[in-house]
């Protein structure tokens, strides 16, 4: 494999066929370049959707009430569906094994002040499980606890930016903020990968908000973290079954599709998986077709090269050269041209992705890049392509009879 004389002969052969070698090598380079760019775009789309949900658990679903569009059981059209603690208890009692986390959510916007600093902020009343569904990061103190829910404690967890607005660099834990005239003790400060909007919120116990702001057990929606052991089809079925059950519990017409909706991340994951899978096979199809064209081009170059060296090969065989040595020489040349051309295409593709990556975010493509597994796969593909391109011409060259070769023009 590392015989200097054989490699010298290979480079001499390539030098004699510069134009044909460059053209066939260009086809392979273009194939790998196309592979790299298309895979980079597919990865960029996956990165975008992953980034879009970075601040939420991947196994969540949200029960969202709306207005009815059909009359049912004497109830009129346009009735606003109101979720309560009763529905939360129903879900826990009937689907305990399918649930990892569950929390109500009630949203308010109230005036919050501390020693002259004040503003209106979004208040989100929740259960303790909400922290895990929303992926809330506790920077200081703690989150809402089950004890807070039971005792209807007047406590708050401030978003990082609200803490900065009200307290600056001063400590906030165990201080009291005024929320619409009522004092609440700060028990925690949180951050969120969702960005500024998420960090300009305040969390309160759902029971406290229900008691003070409405004196009822109403909730705006219910968030569920379904059991991560559920497969995507089972998680989708769970969401569909739960929606039917809640329609019955809330006296909603079975065919009224607008009154209640469950947004299920499992359905989004399924759709994303189907999209990326389709794109992946399109990339494979297009790239493979181009690569096959490159392999055929290199194979033709080998055939021309062998035809021009017919006499030389005949003399080699007459002097005792084994067919295996001739096959090895031709295959080496094919591997060399394929590998160099392919890696030039791979390097150019990664360079282009690196240069244009930031400009593609407006097209929902985030950080397009190729993975190490793609590089390994490209290496194996190039080796196989080189072997395929060189073996058939090499086998033909090894079958040349010395007497016929010496008579060739």
Image: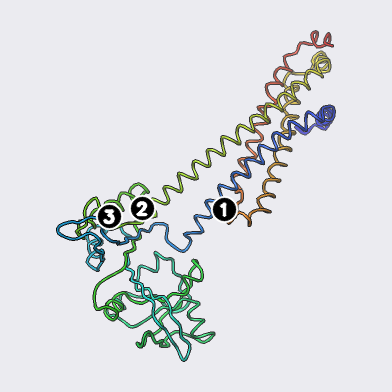
Mark 3 vs mark 2: give the one in front: 3
Residue found 46% across the figure and 48% down from its top: 272
How far apart are the alpha carbons under marks 2 and 1? 34 Å
Q: Is the C-beta separation of discs 3 and 1 under 8 Å?
A: no
* Image spot of residue 78 (x, y percent): 25, 61
Crowdedness near tag 2: few (<14), some (14–19) or many (≥20) residues, C-alpha within 10 Å: few
Image vertical order of residue 327 relative to residue 32, above or below: above
Horizontal and vertical percent for residue 245? Answer: 23, 55
Mark sitting earlier along the chain (3/1): 3
Query: On the rendered image, what quadrant is the C terminus found in?
Result: top right
Residue holding disc 1 = 363
Secondary structure, mark 1, is helix
Residue corresponding to mark 2: 229
- Spatial separation of the CA atoms under disc 3 and disc 1: 34 Å
Q: Residue at x 28, y 61 (%)?
A: 67
Q: Mark 3 — residue?
A: 243
């Amino acid at each position: 494999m590392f015989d200097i004389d054989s490699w010298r002969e290979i480079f001499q052969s390539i030098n004699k066929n510069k134009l044909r070698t460059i053209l066939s090598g260009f086809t392979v380079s273009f194939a790998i370049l196309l592979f790299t760019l298309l895979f980079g775009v597919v990865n960029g789309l996956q990165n975008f959707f992953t980034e879009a949900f970075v601040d939420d658990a991947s196994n969540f679903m949200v029960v969202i009430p709306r207005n009815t569009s059909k009359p049912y059981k004497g109830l009129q059209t346009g009735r606003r569906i109101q979720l309560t603690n009763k529905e939360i208890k129903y879900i826990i009692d009937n689907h305990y094994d399918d649930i990892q986390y569950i929390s109500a959510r009630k949203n308010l916007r109230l005036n919050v002040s501390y020693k002259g600093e004040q503003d209106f902020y979004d208040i989100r009343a929740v259960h303790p499980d909400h922290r895990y569904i929303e992926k809330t990061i506790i920077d200081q103190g703690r989150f809402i606890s089950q004890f807070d829910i039971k005792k209807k404690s007047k406590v708050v967890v401030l978003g990082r930016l609200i803490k900065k607005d009200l307290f600056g660099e001063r400590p906030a834990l165990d201080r009291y903020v005024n929320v619409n005239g009522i004092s609440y003790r700060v028990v925690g400060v949180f951050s969120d990968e969702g960005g500024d909007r998420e960090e300009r919120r305040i969390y309160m116990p759902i029971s406290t908000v229900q008691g003070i702001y409405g004196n009822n057990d109403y909730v705006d929606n219910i968030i569920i973290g379904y059991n991560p052991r559920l497969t995507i089809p089972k998680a989708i079925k769970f969401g569909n079954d739960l929606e039917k059950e809640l329609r019955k519990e809330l006296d909603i017409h079975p065919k009224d599709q607008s009154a209640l909706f469950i947004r299920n991340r499992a359905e989004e994951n399924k759709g994303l998986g189907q999209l990326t899978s389709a794109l992946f096979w399109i990339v494979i199809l297009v790239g493979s077709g181009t690569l096959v064209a490159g392999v055929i081009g290199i194979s033709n170059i080998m055939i021309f090269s062998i035809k021009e060296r017919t006499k030389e090969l005949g003399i080699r065989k007459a002097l005792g050269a084994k067919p295996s040595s001739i096959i090895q020489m031709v295959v080496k040349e094919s591997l060399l041209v394929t590998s160099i051309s392919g890696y030039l295409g791979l390097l150019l593709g990664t360079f282009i992705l690196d240069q244009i990556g930031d400009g593609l975010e407006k097209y929902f493509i985030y950080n397009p890049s190729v993975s190490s597994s793609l590089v390994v796969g490209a290496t194996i593909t190039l080796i196989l392509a080189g072997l395929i391109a060189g073996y058939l011409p090499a086998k033909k060259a090894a079958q040349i009879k010395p007497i016929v070769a010496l008579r060739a023009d």
